[in-house]
Image (spheres, rainbow, N blue to C red):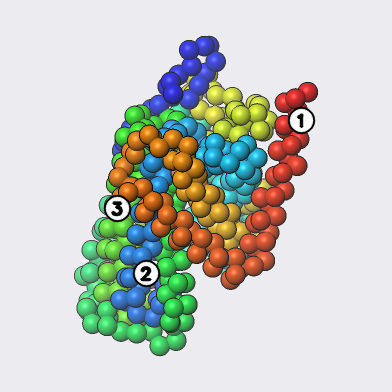
Amino acid sequence: MATASTTNTPSLLRELGASHAASIVIGVVIGSGIFLVPAEMMQAAGSAKLVYLAWIVGGVFSFFGAVTYAQLGAMKPQSGGEYVYIRDAFGPLAGFLVGWTWMLVIKPSSLAAISTGIVRILGSFSVLSFLILPGGQLTWSGKVVATAFVTFISVVNHVGVRRAGNFQLAFTILKITLVVVIAALAFTSGGSWSHFTEHYSTATGGITGFVVAVAAALWAYDGWSDVNMVAEEVKDPERNVPLALIGGLLAIGALYMLVNAAVQFALPAVAVATSASPMSDAVRGSALGVAAVIVVSAAMIISLTTTLNGVAMSGSRMTFALARDGNFFAFLAKVHPRFHTPHLAIALQGILSFCFLLIGGNFRQLFTLALFAEWLSYTAAAVALFVFRSRDRSVSHAVPLWKFPIAPGAFIVASAALLYYTFSSNLRYSVIGSLVILAGIPVFYAFAYRRRV
C-alpha cells in the first residue's frame, strides 16, 4: 500500500518506525495492571509459585496471540486491525459489528477509565483530594481534569502520527526505567526469599483460583493488538509489525516477571493479597521510605498516560477504517491536509470518552462488558488467519508459525476459554456486550442503504 495518495486527497503516511511500533505495544499493555493485579492473583491462586506460574501461562497464551497478529498485520497492513481481518474473512457485516463495538464502547470507555485512573492517583495526594469522592468516584473537578488529559492526548494525536509516536516512545522509555527502579527499590526493602514458599490461607485456591489468576494475568497482558490498528502508518510493516509485537511482548513478560519477583520478595503472601497497591507497599521499606511511594504514584501516572496515548492513536484508526469503507459517516474518513491524521475520527473518539466520563459509574463493570467483546474479536481474528490460509496456501509467514496451526490454534483455545469464563462469571454484562454488538446490525444496513441511493 502506498504511503501517500497519488492524488491531491491527503492520506495517512507511514511515519512510525520499529521503535515507535514497539512502544505502542509496550506502552498500551503496561498500564496500571502491573501495579495492582499481584494482589488479585494472590487472592485467587494463594501462593507466590502459583502466581508466577499464572504469569507464565498468561504470557505464553499472549505470545501465541502476538505471533498470530504478527502474521495478520504483515498480511494486511491497513488501518483498523480486527475490523479489516474479520471483514475480509467473514464479510462486511461481521467486520462492521466488530468495528462498531470497538468504536462505540471499547476504545472511548477505555480512555474514560484510564483518565479516571490517573485522576484517582492524583486525588490520593492530600493537596488534590478534592478531585475524588470517598468512594473513589470523581468530583466535577476531577472529571474536568480527566477531560483535560483526554483532550491533551487527542491534540497530540491530531498534530501528526510522528509526533504522537515520539511522545509514545519517550514516555514508554521513561515508564520502563521507572518500573526497573521501583523493582530495585523493592529488592532493597528488607524482604525475604522465604516469602516464595508461603501460602495465603483464605485464597480461592484449586483449579478455579488458578484460572482466575491466569485471567487476571491475561488482562494485564492485554493491549498488544493495538499496533495492528495503526499498521497503515508503520514503515515496512511486514517486518516492523511482527518485530514490535513479538519483541514488545517478550520485553513486557520480562518486566512482569521482574516486578512480580520484587513484590513477592518484599512482602509476605498475606500482605500481597490484602494490599490495595502491592508495589507501593513493597517499596515502603526501602531507603527512600515514603518518597519511594511517591515514585510509584508518579510511575503509575506516567504509565497510564502512555497507555492513554496508545489507545487514542489506535482507536481512531478503527473509526477511520469504518468510514473509509462507507460503513459510517464519510466525514470521519477525512485526513488532515497538513498533519495527515484522521482528525475528525480522533475528535469523535474524544467526545465519546467525555460522554463516558460524564456518565461515570462502575468502570469495573464497563471493563467486563468491553472485555467480552474484545476477546470475541480476538478469537474471530485468529480464526480469520485460518480462512486466509485456506484460500491461499502460498501466503508466506512473516514469522514461524511452527507448522502453522500451533500458535493461532492455541490462541483460539485460550481465547475461547477466557470468553467462556467471562460469560459464565459475568453473565449480565456479557449479555449486554452481546446486545451492543448486535445493535450494530440495523446501523450497518442503514449505511448500506445510503450507499445504494
Q: Counting residues from the N terminus, which is met first, the one under dot 1 or under dot 2? A: 2
* Residue topped by disc 3: 250
Could you tell me the amino acid type at mark 3?
A: Leu
* Residue topped by disc 2: 54
Asked if marks 3 and 1 touch (Cβ < 8 Å), the reply is no
Quarter in which the C terminus is drawn: top right
**Whole-number angstrom distance, CA of label 3 to CA of label 1:** 46 Å
Residue furthest bottom as drawn = 201
Q: Decide: few, some or many residues near mark 3? Use Cα within 10 Å; few <14, some 14-19, many ≥20.
A: some
Question: Which residue does the image show at 56% across and 33% down from the upper left?
Answer: 321
Q: Counting residues from the N terminus, which is met first, the one under dot 2 or under dot 3? A: 2
Question: Which residue does the image show at 51% across and 31% down from the upper left?
Answer: 158
Tell me the element at label 1.
Answer: helix
In front here: 159 or 447?
A: 447
Q: Position of residue 222 (x, y in %)?
A: 44, 55
Q: Decide: few, some or many residues near mark 1? Use Cα within 10 Å; few <14, some 14-19, many ≥20.
A: few
Question: Could one spot residue 113 in this view of the protein?
Answer: no
Quarter in which the N terminus is drawn: top left
Q: Position of residue 352 (x, y in %)?
A: 64, 44
In front here: 293 or 130?
A: 293
Could you tell me the amino acid type at mark 2?
A: Ala
Residue 371: mark: none
Q: Quadrant of residue 61?
A: bottom left
**Whole-number angstrom distance, CA of label 2 to CA of label 3:** 16 Å
Count of numbered circles in the view: 3
Tell me the element at label 3.
Answer: helix
Q: Counting residues from the N terminus, which is met first, the one under dot 3 or under dot 1? A: 3
Question: Which residue does the image show at 46% across and 41% down from the upper left?
Answer: 390
* Residue topped by disc 1: 449
**Whole-number angstrom distance, CA of label 1 to CA of label 2:** 49 Å
Residue 62 drawn above or below residue 210:
above
